[in-house]
Image: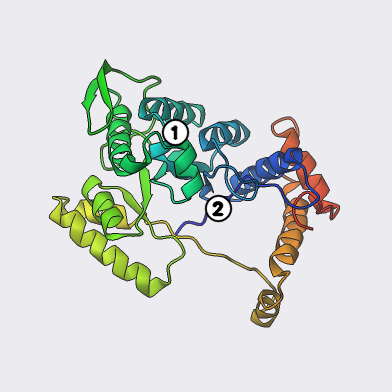
Protein backbone atom coordinates (compact mmCIF):
# COMPACT_ATOMS: atom_id res chain seq x y z
CA UNK A 1 0.00 0.00 0.00
CA UNK A 2 1.15 3.51 -0.85
CA UNK A 3 -0.07 6.67 0.84
CA UNK A 4 -0.55 9.93 -0.99
CA UNK A 5 -2.11 13.36 -0.44
CA UNK A 6 -5.48 14.58 -1.71
CA UNK A 7 -5.03 18.32 -2.16
CA UNK A 8 -7.29 21.12 -3.30
CA UNK A 9 -6.51 24.67 -4.33
CA UNK A 10 -8.83 26.55 -2.03
CA UNK A 11 -8.99 29.70 0.05
CA UNK A 12 -9.87 29.47 3.72
CA UNK A 13 -11.34 32.11 5.99
CA UNK A 14 -9.01 35.07 6.59
CA UNK A 15 -6.62 33.73 3.94
CA UNK A 16 -5.64 35.03 0.51
CA UNK A 17 -5.02 33.39 -2.83
CA UNK A 18 -1.30 33.95 -2.29
CA UNK A 19 -1.62 32.01 0.98
CA UNK A 20 -3.33 29.19 -0.92
CA UNK A 21 -0.47 29.02 -3.42
CA UNK A 22 2.13 28.95 -0.64
CA UNK A 23 0.27 26.25 1.25
CA UNK A 24 -0.07 24.05 -1.84
CA UNK A 25 3.63 24.42 -2.66
CA UNK A 26 4.58 23.59 0.91
CA UNK A 27 2.25 20.57 0.96
CA UNK A 28 3.71 19.16 -2.25
CA UNK A 29 7.28 19.65 -1.05
CA UNK A 30 6.51 18.17 2.34
CA UNK A 31 5.11 15.08 0.64
CA UNK A 32 8.10 14.98 -1.69
CA UNK A 33 10.57 15.14 1.20
CA UNK A 34 8.76 12.70 3.50
CA UNK A 35 8.02 9.72 1.31
CA UNK A 36 4.42 10.25 0.20
CA UNK A 37 3.75 8.42 -3.06
CA UNK A 38 1.63 10.99 -4.85
CA UNK A 39 -0.37 14.19 -4.66
CA UNK A 40 -3.75 14.50 -6.36
CA UNK A 41 -5.49 17.73 -7.43
CA UNK A 42 -9.21 18.02 -8.05
CA UNK A 43 -10.85 19.99 -10.85
CA UNK A 44 -13.85 22.18 -10.10
CA UNK A 45 -15.11 25.48 -11.44
CA UNK A 46 -16.88 28.59 -10.14
CA UNK A 47 -16.07 27.93 -6.49
CA UNK A 48 -13.20 28.94 -4.24
CA UNK A 49 -13.82 26.02 -1.90
CA UNK A 50 -12.51 23.06 -3.88
CA UNK A 51 -10.28 22.23 -6.77
CA UNK A 52 -8.69 24.22 -9.54
CA UNK A 53 -10.17 25.24 -12.85
CA UNK A 54 -7.02 24.12 -14.65
CA UNK A 55 -5.31 21.25 -12.80
CA UNK A 56 -2.67 20.87 -15.52
CA UNK A 57 -1.40 24.39 -14.82
CA UNK A 58 -1.19 23.69 -11.10
CA UNK A 59 0.50 20.32 -11.63
CA UNK A 60 3.06 21.92 -13.93
CA UNK A 61 3.85 24.42 -11.18
CA UNK A 62 4.19 21.64 -8.60
CA UNK A 63 6.36 19.61 -10.97
CA UNK A 64 8.90 22.43 -10.87
CA UNK A 65 8.79 22.47 -7.04
CA UNK A 66 9.31 18.73 -6.48
CA UNK A 67 11.66 15.91 -7.48
CA UNK A 68 10.13 12.53 -6.62
CA UNK A 69 6.43 12.56 -5.68
CA UNK A 70 3.96 11.60 -8.40
CA UNK A 71 1.39 14.23 -9.39
CA UNK A 72 -2.16 13.52 -10.49
CA UNK A 73 -5.40 15.12 -11.55
CA UNK A 74 -8.38 13.48 -9.83
CA UNK A 75 -10.16 14.01 -12.01
CA UNK A 76 -9.79 15.87 -15.30
CA UNK A 77 -13.32 16.61 -16.54
CA UNK A 78 -12.83 15.36 -20.08
CA UNK A 79 -16.07 16.58 -21.74
CA UNK A 80 -15.16 20.18 -20.93
CA UNK A 81 -11.95 20.13 -23.00
CA UNK A 82 -10.98 19.98 -26.61
CA UNK A 83 -9.29 16.56 -26.36
CA UNK A 84 -6.27 17.46 -28.48
CA UNK A 85 -5.54 20.47 -26.31
CA UNK A 86 -5.98 18.38 -23.17
CA UNK A 87 -3.58 15.75 -24.53
CA UNK A 88 -0.99 18.43 -25.28
CA UNK A 89 -1.25 19.90 -21.80
CA UNK A 90 -0.98 16.53 -20.07
CA UNK A 91 1.97 15.38 -22.16
CA UNK A 92 3.70 18.67 -21.38
CA UNK A 93 3.17 18.13 -17.65
CA UNK A 94 4.45 14.56 -18.07
CA UNK A 95 7.59 16.02 -19.64
CA UNK A 96 8.00 18.81 -17.07
CA UNK A 97 7.66 16.30 -14.23
CA UNK A 98 10.03 13.85 -15.93
CA UNK A 99 7.41 11.13 -16.04
CA UNK A 100 5.62 11.64 -12.70
CA UNK A 101 2.10 12.35 -13.99
CA UNK A 102 -1.03 10.27 -13.24
CA UNK A 103 -4.21 11.12 -15.15
CA UNK A 104 -7.60 10.75 -13.51
CA UNK A 105 -10.53 11.13 -15.93
CA UNK A 106 -14.23 11.71 -15.37
CA UNK A 107 -17.39 13.24 -16.84
CA UNK A 108 -18.19 15.76 -14.10
CA UNK A 109 -21.32 15.99 -11.99
CA UNK A 110 -21.97 19.66 -11.14
CA UNK A 111 -24.83 20.98 -13.31
CA UNK A 112 -23.42 24.53 -13.47
CA UNK A 113 -20.06 23.26 -14.70
CA UNK A 114 -21.67 21.17 -17.43
CA UNK A 115 -24.04 23.96 -18.47
CA UNK A 116 -21.23 26.50 -18.87
CA UNK A 117 -18.26 24.44 -20.05
CA UNK A 118 -19.58 21.40 -21.94
CA UNK A 119 -19.94 22.23 -25.65
CA UNK A 120 -22.98 19.95 -25.93
CA UNK A 121 -24.38 18.84 -22.54
CA UNK A 122 -26.80 16.45 -24.21
CA UNK A 123 -23.83 14.60 -25.68
CA UNK A 124 -21.53 14.60 -22.65
CA UNK A 125 -21.20 10.81 -22.84
CA UNK A 126 -20.01 11.00 -26.47
CA UNK A 127 -17.60 13.80 -25.58
CA UNK A 128 -16.16 11.73 -22.75
CA UNK A 129 -15.79 8.58 -24.87
CA UNK A 130 -14.16 10.46 -27.73
CA UNK A 131 -11.93 12.43 -25.37
CA UNK A 132 -10.57 9.30 -23.71
CA UNK A 133 -9.96 7.67 -27.10
CA UNK A 134 -8.00 10.72 -28.24
CA UNK A 135 -5.93 10.71 -25.06
CA UNK A 136 -5.17 7.01 -25.52
CA UNK A 137 -4.06 7.61 -29.11
CA UNK A 138 -1.98 10.66 -28.19
CA UNK A 139 -0.26 8.85 -25.33
CA UNK A 140 1.02 6.20 -27.75
CA UNK A 141 3.26 8.87 -29.24
CA UNK A 142 2.49 8.08 -32.88
CA UNK A 143 0.58 9.90 -35.62
CA UNK A 144 -3.14 9.20 -35.68
CA UNK A 145 -6.38 10.34 -37.24
CA UNK A 146 -9.65 10.26 -35.40
CA UNK A 147 -13.28 9.66 -36.37
CA UNK A 148 -15.46 9.62 -33.28
CA UNK A 149 -19.06 10.18 -32.40
CA UNK A 150 -18.41 13.90 -31.82
CA UNK A 151 -14.81 14.78 -32.68
CA UNK A 152 -13.15 14.27 -36.09
CA UNK A 153 -9.50 15.07 -36.88
CA UNK A 154 -7.18 14.60 -39.83
CA UNK A 155 -3.89 12.84 -39.20
CA UNK A 156 -1.94 14.58 -36.45
CA UNK A 157 0.87 13.87 -34.02
CA UNK A 158 0.99 15.48 -30.60
CA UNK A 159 4.16 16.77 -28.99
CA UNK A 160 6.04 16.44 -26.73
CA UNK A 161 6.07 12.64 -26.81
CA UNK A 162 5.26 10.78 -23.59
CA UNK A 163 8.01 10.15 -21.07
CA UNK A 164 6.50 7.16 -19.31
CA UNK A 165 6.45 3.56 -20.39
CA UNK A 166 4.43 1.48 -17.98
CA UNK A 167 5.08 -2.07 -16.86
CA UNK A 168 2.15 -3.25 -18.98
CA UNK A 169 4.19 -2.12 -22.03
CA UNK A 170 1.95 0.81 -22.90
CA UNK A 171 3.18 4.37 -23.04
CA UNK A 172 2.08 7.61 -21.47
CA UNK A 173 0.81 8.49 -18.00
CA UNK A 174 -1.45 5.86 -16.41
CA UNK A 175 -5.21 6.48 -16.40
CA UNK A 176 -7.43 6.35 -13.31
CA UNK A 177 -11.22 6.62 -13.31
CA UNK A 178 -13.97 6.75 -10.66
CA UNK A 179 -16.13 3.62 -10.82
CA UNK A 180 -19.41 4.99 -9.53
CA UNK A 181 -22.01 3.39 -11.81
CA UNK A 182 -22.48 0.28 -13.98
CA UNK A 183 -21.49 2.32 -17.03
CA UNK A 184 -18.30 3.65 -15.48
CA UNK A 185 -17.33 0.20 -14.18
CA UNK A 186 -17.82 -1.29 -17.66
CA UNK A 187 -15.99 1.57 -19.40
CA UNK A 188 -12.98 1.49 -17.08
CA UNK A 189 -12.77 -2.30 -17.28
CA UNK A 190 -13.02 -2.37 -21.07
CA UNK A 191 -10.32 0.26 -21.49
CA UNK A 192 -8.03 -1.19 -18.82
CA UNK A 193 -8.21 1.94 -16.66
CA UNK A 194 -7.19 1.76 -12.99
CA UNK A 195 -10.26 2.15 -10.73
CA UNK A 196 -10.79 4.97 -8.26
CA UNK A 197 -13.21 3.71 -5.60
CA UNK A 198 -13.53 6.99 -3.70
CA UNK A 199 -14.81 6.98 -0.12
CA UNK A 200 -16.65 3.66 -0.29
CA UNK A 201 -16.65 1.39 2.72
CA UNK A 202 -14.35 -1.65 2.29
CA UNK A 203 -17.19 -4.12 1.75
CA UNK A 204 -18.81 -2.00 -0.95
CA UNK A 205 -15.43 -1.30 -2.59
CA UNK A 206 -14.72 -5.03 -2.70
CA UNK A 207 -18.05 -5.67 -4.42
CA UNK A 208 -17.41 -2.93 -6.98
CA UNK A 209 -13.92 -4.23 -7.71
CA UNK A 210 -15.31 -7.74 -8.15
CA UNK A 211 -17.69 -6.43 -10.83
CA UNK A 212 -14.83 -4.48 -12.39
CA UNK A 213 -12.57 -7.55 -12.55
CA UNK A 214 -15.36 -9.63 -14.10
CA UNK A 215 -16.00 -6.95 -16.73
CA UNK A 216 -12.28 -6.61 -17.47
CA UNK A 217 -11.94 -10.34 -18.13
CA UNK A 218 -15.06 -10.26 -20.30
CA UNK A 219 -13.44 -7.45 -22.31
CA UNK A 220 -10.45 -9.69 -23.05
CA UNK A 221 -7.94 -8.70 -20.39
CA UNK A 222 -6.04 -11.71 -19.07
CA UNK A 223 -5.57 -12.50 -15.38
CA UNK A 224 -2.12 -10.91 -15.27
CA UNK A 225 -3.45 -7.63 -16.66
CA UNK A 226 -6.43 -7.62 -14.28
CA UNK A 227 -4.10 -8.26 -11.34
CA UNK A 228 -1.87 -5.38 -12.50
CA UNK A 229 -4.87 -3.04 -12.55
CA UNK A 230 -6.28 -4.15 -9.19
CA UNK A 231 -2.87 -3.80 -7.57
CA UNK A 232 -3.05 -0.07 -8.32
CA UNK A 233 -6.58 0.72 -7.14
CA UNK A 234 -6.85 4.13 -5.47
CA UNK A 235 -9.18 5.05 -2.62
CA UNK A 236 -9.81 8.11 -0.46
CA UNK A 237 -9.76 8.16 3.32
CA UNK A 238 -9.83 10.90 5.93
CA UNK A 239 -7.04 10.22 8.42
CA UNK A 240 -6.70 11.75 11.86
CA UNK A 241 -3.45 11.21 13.76
CA UNK A 242 -3.47 11.56 17.55
CA UNK A 243 -1.53 10.19 20.52
CA UNK A 244 -4.34 7.74 21.38
CA UNK A 245 -7.59 6.38 20.02
CA UNK A 246 -9.51 8.18 22.78
CA UNK A 247 -8.00 11.50 21.80
CA UNK A 248 -8.73 10.85 18.11
CA UNK A 249 -12.37 10.03 18.87
CA UNK A 250 -12.67 13.13 21.03
CA UNK A 251 -11.32 15.27 18.23
CA UNK A 252 -13.73 13.81 15.69
CA UNK A 253 -16.68 14.44 18.00
CA UNK A 254 -16.25 18.20 17.90
CA UNK A 255 -17.59 20.25 15.03
CA UNK A 256 -14.33 22.17 14.73
CA UNK A 257 -12.18 19.03 14.65
CA UNK A 258 -10.93 19.49 11.10
CA UNK A 259 -9.82 23.02 11.82
CA UNK A 260 -7.99 21.89 14.96
CA UNK A 261 -6.51 18.89 13.20
CA UNK A 262 -5.13 20.74 10.21
CA UNK A 263 -3.78 23.60 12.29
CA UNK A 264 -1.81 21.27 14.56
CA UNK A 265 -0.70 19.11 11.63
CA UNK A 266 0.62 22.13 9.75
CA UNK A 267 2.49 23.38 12.82
CA UNK A 268 4.21 20.06 13.50
CA UNK A 269 4.85 19.37 9.82
CA UNK A 270 6.35 22.82 9.44
CA UNK A 271 8.78 22.21 12.30
CA UNK A 272 9.94 18.94 10.75
CA UNK A 273 10.10 20.11 7.16
CA UNK A 274 12.23 23.15 7.90
CA UNK A 275 15.14 20.75 8.17
CA UNK A 276 14.71 19.62 4.58
CA UNK A 277 13.12 22.69 2.99
CA UNK A 278 15.53 24.34 0.58
CA UNK A 279 14.69 28.06 0.21
CA UNK A 280 16.69 28.23 -3.02
CA UNK A 281 14.59 25.40 -4.48
CA UNK A 282 11.18 26.32 -3.12
CA UNK A 283 11.04 29.77 -1.53
CA UNK A 284 7.24 29.63 -1.10
CA UNK A 285 7.42 26.26 0.63
CA UNK A 286 10.13 27.44 3.00
CA UNK A 287 8.19 30.57 3.90
CA UNK A 288 5.09 28.54 4.47
CA UNK A 289 6.91 26.08 6.74
CA UNK A 290 8.18 29.01 8.80
CA UNK A 291 4.68 30.42 9.15
CA UNK A 292 3.34 27.02 10.12
CA UNK A 293 6.03 26.53 12.74
CA UNK A 294 5.15 29.90 14.29
CA UNK A 295 1.55 28.75 14.63
CA UNK A 296 0.23 31.24 12.07
CA UNK A 297 -2.88 29.49 10.83
CA UNK A 298 -4.81 32.35 9.25
CA UNK A 299 -3.61 31.12 5.87
CA UNK A 300 -5.32 27.76 6.34
CA UNK A 301 -8.03 27.41 9.00
CA UNK A 302 -9.84 29.96 11.14
Q: Position of residue 208 (x, y in %)?
A: 31, 65
Which image quarter holds the C terminus?
bottom right
Dot 1: element:
loop
264 to 247, vertically: above or below: above
Label at residue 167: none
Question: Do labels 2 and 1 touch, CB within 8 Å?
Answer: no
Percent across and percent down for residue 231 are 33, 57
- Image: 266 above or below 163: below
For label 2, the SS is strand
Q: Residue at x 70, y 47 (%)?
A: 11
Q: Is residue 5 visible?
A: yes
Question: Residue 207, located in which quarter of the rendered image?
Answer: bottom left
Q: Is residue 92 left or right of residue 139?
A: right
Residue annotated with mark 1: 99
Residue placed under numbered mark 2 in the picture: 6
Gap in angstroms between the C-alphas marked 2 and 1:
20 Å
Give the camera-side residue of 145 and 240: 145
Residue closer to the observer: 81 or 110: 110
- Disc 1 crowd rating (10 Å Cα; few below 14, some 14-19, many 20+) is many
Please identify the quadrant where the N terminus is shown.
Answer: bottom left
Q: Circle 2: is it few (<14), some (14-19), or many (20+) Cα within 10 Å?
A: some
Quadrant hosting residue 276: top right
Q: Nearer the viewer, mark 2 or mark 1?
A: 2
Q: Which of these two is toward me, 150 or 169?
A: 150
The residue positioned 42% from the left and 37% from the top of the image is 118
Task: Tell me the residue at 59%/44% (across/down).
Answer: 32
Counting from the top left corner in percent of width and height, residue 210 is at 26, 66
Judge whether residue 278 can be spotted in this image. no
Please report the residue visible at 79 percent of the width from the left and 40 percent of the height from the top. 287
Amino acid sequence: MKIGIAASFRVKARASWDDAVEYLAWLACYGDDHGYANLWMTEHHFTEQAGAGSPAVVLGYLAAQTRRIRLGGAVMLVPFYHPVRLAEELLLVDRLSRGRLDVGIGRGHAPIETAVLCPDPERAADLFDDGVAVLEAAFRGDSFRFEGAYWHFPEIRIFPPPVQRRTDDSSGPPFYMPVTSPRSIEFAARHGIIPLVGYREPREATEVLGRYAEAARAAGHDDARVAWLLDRVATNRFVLVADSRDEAEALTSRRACLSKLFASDVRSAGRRSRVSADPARVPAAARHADRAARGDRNFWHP
